[in-house]
Image (cartoon, rainbow, N blue to C red):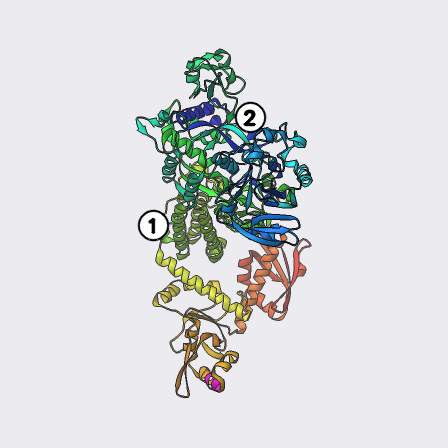
Amino acid sequence: MDWNNSYFTMADENNYSIWLFLKQCHDRGLIYRGIDSMPWCPRCSTGISHHEIATEGYEDITHTSMYVKLPLIERPGESLLIWTTTPWTLPANVAAEVHPDLTYVRVRQGDDVLILSKGTVASALTGAHEVIGELTGKDLMGLHYRGPFDHLPIVIEQGVPEAHIVIGGSDVTETEGTGIVHIAPGCGDIDFALGKQYGLPIVAPIDEFARYYAGFGDLTGAYAPDVAPTVAATMREGGFLYRVLPYTHRYPKCWRCHTELVFRVVDEWFISMDGPKADEARARVAGREMPPLREQIAEVVRKIEWHPSWGLERELDWLRNMGDWMISKKRYWGLALPIWTCDDPVCGWWDVVGGDDELQSRATEGWEAFAGHAPHRPWVDGVHIACAKCGGQATRIKDVGNPWLDAGIVSFSTLGYRHDKDYWKEWFPAHFITESFPGQFRNWFYSLLVMSTVLENREPFRAVLGYATLRDETGREMHKSWGNSIEFNEAAERIGASVMRWLYAGANTEANLNFGYGIADQIKRRLLVLWNVYAFFCNYARLDGFDPHVHTVPVADRTDLDRWILAELHVLVDDVTKRYEDFDSRTATWRIEAFVDDLSTWYLRRGRSRYWKNEADTDKRAAYATLWEVLTTLTRLMGPSMPFLAEEMYQNLERSTGADVPISVHHTDWPVSDPTLIDDDLRRSMSVVRTVVGLARAARSKVKVKVRQPLPALVVRARSEAERSALVRLSTQITEELNVKELRFASDDEVLVTYRVKPNFKVLGPRFGPRVNAVARALQAADGAEVQRRHAKGEPAVVIVEGLELEVPAAEFDVEAVDAPGFAVVDDGGLLIALDTTLTPELVAEGLSREITHAVNGMRKDAGFNLEDRIVTRYDASGDGAAVFATFASEIASETLSTTLEAGTAGSSQEAYRKTVTLDGHEVTIAIERRRA
């Protein structure tokens, strides 16, 4: 990490780089001061831009909703019924909005006649009522009404009582409420826009702390979100309240402190996304008309590689629909916005300063006191410049900048953009960025794009990867209050950072990631497969003194098994490289896991005995060299996703050899696939072999015969000459893995399985009636193999009954495979294998010897012996058990590292580890101990 050049938002270069950006915006006429109803945090006492609350800023909140009656002046005795979820806004009500084309009804209820939309009657009203007429929204437009707070001094002063009017709008729906929307331009952005459109009075009821101004009667000084009871009491007293209900909905909260937001009419500073809002002349840069900023940004966005691909359209959709960017905050600490305004409010002049040099050259007062300080309050506020319009003094505004300005300038401020463009060009744009996409399309990605487009009209990054959010194991959001959140330090301590990294790398970035200790344990089990292979290699390589730089064997001189795993390795290198280049760590992770599974369950399983033998021949050296090459390549492939585990393996596998190699795996070259080592014929052959082995294991399971029990033969009917050749080439792998004495191929006339057709009389009976038995006999007499072939494809069987050709659908009969006597048969799409299950006394004895070997090796592990420990093994057995020990003494001793294998456990020392086991019905007592030097 480049700690010497750490990025701090409060740094001078960061602030002055933003000043430069804002200056260029101003030169294009994009910065303006606007009055609007904006989201506002009462605790932070500042506005919150829509960009900041677009997604994460919403939470489920239960409010007091109210249905309110507004008596119509032109229709005495009738009232509009409106609904609101924010009662604090009712004192600022100015208008009621209807949809011109909706159907509204007049409903009599007691002495009241209420007007609401036809589609909301059932949900809005309570109690008995009578519909007495219908009318459209157009019929209501232009009517006037009395409001529940028309008696308040400030409401009267604003002329609201005379202004209450019904307006029309296409955004009114019947989804909820009454089809009549309460409009308070001083308390909402949409309402504010309608107020400007219709020239309505604007009542701004609350201050920066969300407390009512003077003039609002009992509400004066009250905190807006808490006034629902007072508002309800006032309306109930005046006869305006219809009913009150709790209502839970998504509502904005401050993204920093989580305080419930309100809406206030405030003056803020904005960057226009559409065109110049200030001096039209500023829109001309370098002698040409500039297109709207949002269109320029969209062109830049299209040059970026988006992952997931739909991120492009999401960003473009945001650009098409977003409002202007509010860049000011009513706070003290933060970026000092470089906007100076004339002290004479009548003059109205203002300007943007683009950096420290410009400020120094324009300063008329305060520079000396400011020099040496950071461009923050209070120091920068003392610097004044001259008003270019009236010649008076101009002072910096008190506002600070939106924090996303700090985040968006990073591509410029950290690379010396203002002072060393050549250095900046070496590193710009960034090759890749990543962040959680729910909010960053509207925040960080957006701010980076805006600032880069204005400054250079270029993309700030070449590729971006967006990812979803983290949830708990059940898919719920994590919250401390729910008790399901997990702190990073706790998780890292309990499951390890590598497990978490691998979990994240293997996740679908488009979907939320469920995280928990149960899921992490699954990842750990997968990684333990790799670790066990690595540990196996390290243990045996240490015992044999293997040196990868000395004990080399040409690939051409290695076994088919070695060359197969190397071929798969180089295919893996090519595939993982492409996946990483496509930012697809998920598939890369899966491919590595699948390869490691093949490495463990096939390559090492098949070649384990090569490491056990005493002689250090070419085959043993080839086994070590191959596994070392595989493991060292894997460390590089895993490095981006599991840097610490990869580093641990690298240091032990390569750095420990004393060879002149890079200090870290992350300093090594990325592996390159060698096409000369990719033997596709061998890969296909091994695939056939593994398929046959899998089928044969299923056959053993079918007849419940253990793998340690040798069988006479495996008979195969291959589907092609290529399959047959593959099985012949690698026949030793099959016979050893399956513990069979022989692999042979079925002759054309050898019957290994027959097929019995079983009619489904419940279905056949109703369809064929009295002919059902004849149809059943015809099915049973048909060529079973042909019927089975058609049945497997879902095709009907064709039979002749009473001279008629009939088709019997596959759903109307079943086909049962019947193995030939003495065989266990499995058929996979025409590839048929049959295990000869005939057991001779010799085979039974050999099977028992393998059970003994397995039991002794299990005892070695239980006793805590080291891999290299030679042992003395003694046994107590009788009959067939004793005979097996004698007959297979050499094999048992070799496989268990027993230097002595003798009858009679009485000769064992007291330190010996003893165990009595029952093996295939034979009770055997075994005692093992380390051989004394």
Q: Nearer the viewer, residue 58 or 164?
A: 164
Q: Nearer the viewer, residue 44 or 1?
A: 44
Q: Picture coordinates of residue 835 (x, y %)?
A: 48, 71
Q: Which residues are magenta?
A: 771-776
Badge 2 or badge 1: first in the primary sequence: 2
Are the residues tagged 2 and 1 within 8 Å (C-beta)?
Answer: no
Q: Picture coordinates of residue 593 (x, y %)?
A: 48, 51
Residue wearing tag 2: 331
- The residue sitting at the bottom extreme is 802
- Describe the element under mark 1 as helix, strand or loop: helix
Residue wearing tag 1: 675
Type of amino acid at the residue the image marks with label 1: Pro
Q: What separation in Å lies between label 2 and label 1 (alpha carbons)?
A: 63 Å
Q: Nearer the viewer, residue 430 or 408?
A: 408
Residue beneath the point at 51% across and 46% down: 139
Residue beneath the point at 68% across and 41% down: 236
